[in-house]
Amino acid sequence: MIHSTLCQCFFSLAQLLRVESGQAAFDIPVGRTQEGSVIRERRQVPLTPTGRQTDIELGYAFSPSPTRRLEFNVLHVLEPDHVRNAPADTAVLTRYGRRF
């Protein structure tokens, strides 16, 4: 059987779902009195995001034979965790697979 080398390229652009607005309220234990009672504080945290996370992914896959595959991917994330002006994140991934 003759095998022709198979190459694939792909591009992905995604904006993840996010909470538009909200408040989280916490009742946090912060200490104890001398008698042993727990001292608690109530804290509120805004959940409204300041940015919009965008994921950009590029990939290349190469199959030198019918049973082997090698992949290279680069993922670049703008405004990670939906935080405006957060430094961008980049990940480079490699995967090798073999069927038997």
Image: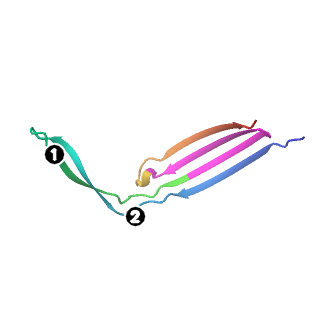
Q: Quadrant of the N terminus?
A: top right
Q: Main secondary structure of the magenta part?
A: strand
The numbered mark at residue 11 is none
Q: Residue at x 67, y 41 (%)?
A: 71
Instruction: Please give left or right for residue 46 compared with residue 99 in the image.
Output: left
| Residue under the image location 34 percent in, 62 percent down | 22
Q: Which residues are magenta?
A: 56-80
**Residue pointed to by mark 1:** 39
Residue in the picture at 58% in, 40% down: 92
The quarter of the picture where residue 84 lies is bottom left
In the rendered image, which quarter contains the C terminus? top right
Going by the numbered disc 1, the residue's amino acid type is Ile
Mark 1 surroundings: few (<14), some (14-19) or many (≥20) residues within 10 A? few
Q: Quadrant of residue 19?
A: bottom left
Q: Is residue 58 left or right of residue 4?
A: left
Identify the residue position indicated by label 2 in the image.
Answer: 20
Q: Is residue 72 left or right of residue 14?
A: right
| Image location (x, y in percent) of residue 70 | 70, 39
- Contact? badges 2 and 1 (CB < 8 Å): no
Q: Nearer the viewer, residue 98 or 20?
A: 98
Residue type pointed to by label 2: Glu
Residue 91 in the image, given as x and y percentages of width and height: 54, 42
Is 78 included in the stretch rendered in magenta?
A: yes
* Residue 96 % position (x, y): 68, 36
Regarding mark 1 in the picture, which secondary structure is present there? strand
Q: Residue at image x 85%, y 41%?
A: 3
- Measuring from the top left, give residue 66's x and y in whole percent: 80, 40
Determine the secondary structure under disc 2: loop
Q: Please determine whether, in this image, residue 47 is positioned above or below residue 99.
A: below
